[in-house]
């Protein structure tokens, strides 16, 4: 048995049943990579203690901030620093990888 495993993201995302319900893909030290289907609007929220990294695997999303909107396309990523109020949204179904501390509640506050 190998100590290294390969994860097929295509298989992970093909199993999505609903939007805004992240699934843990893999843990790395105290971090977790989660995958989620973004479709429509999510609510305004913030994470007081942890930064949150969004990487678009497929599609395009927006991260609404208080005074600006960040657009992220396939292969792009951005980090929302801890304490920053934000609201993700996607006009069409988009798959996003979230790189977060494992203690982060990925459904916001």
Image (cartoon, rainbow, N blue to C red):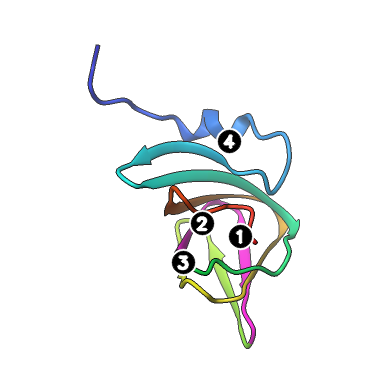
The one nearer the camera, 2 or 50, is: 50
Q: Earlier in the sequence, mark 4 or mark 3?
A: 4
**Secondary element type, mark 2:** loop
Look at the numbered discs 1 and 2 and tell me whether their residues touch, using CB distance below 8 Å.
Answer: yes
Q: Residues within 10 Å of mark 3 (few under 14, many from 20)?
A: few
Which part of the image, by quadrant, shows the C terminus?
Answer: bottom right
Which label sits in the foreground, 3 or 2? 3
Look at the numbered discs 2 and 4 and tell me whether their residues touch, using CB distance below 8 Å.
Answer: no
Relative height, residue 48 to residue 29 (above, below): below
Residue placed under numbered mark 4 in the picture: 13
* Identity of the residue drawn at 23% across and 17% down: 2
Which label sits in the foreground, 4 or 3? 3
Examine the structure image and report whether residue 43 is included in the region drawn in magenta: no
**Secondary element type, mark 4:** helix
Residue placed under numbered mark 3 in the picture: 49
Q: CA distance from mark 3 to mark 2?
A: 27 Å
Residue 74, numbered circle: 2
Q: Which region shows up in magenta?
A: 49-66
């Amino acid at each position: 048995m190998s100590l290294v495993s390969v994860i097929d993201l295509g298989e992970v995302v093909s199993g999505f049943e609903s939007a805004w319900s992240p699934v843990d893909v893999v843990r790395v030290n105290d971090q977790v990579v989660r995958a989620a289907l973004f479709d429509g609007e999510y609510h305004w929220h913030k994470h007081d203690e942890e930064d949150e990294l969004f990487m678009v695997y497929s599609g395009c999303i927006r991260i609404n901030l208080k005074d600006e909107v960040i657009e992220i396309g396939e292969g792009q990523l951005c980090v929302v620093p801890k304490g920053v109020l934000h609201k993700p949204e996607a006009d069409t179904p988009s798959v996003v990888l979230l790189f977060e501390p494992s203690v982060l509640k990925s459904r916001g506050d």
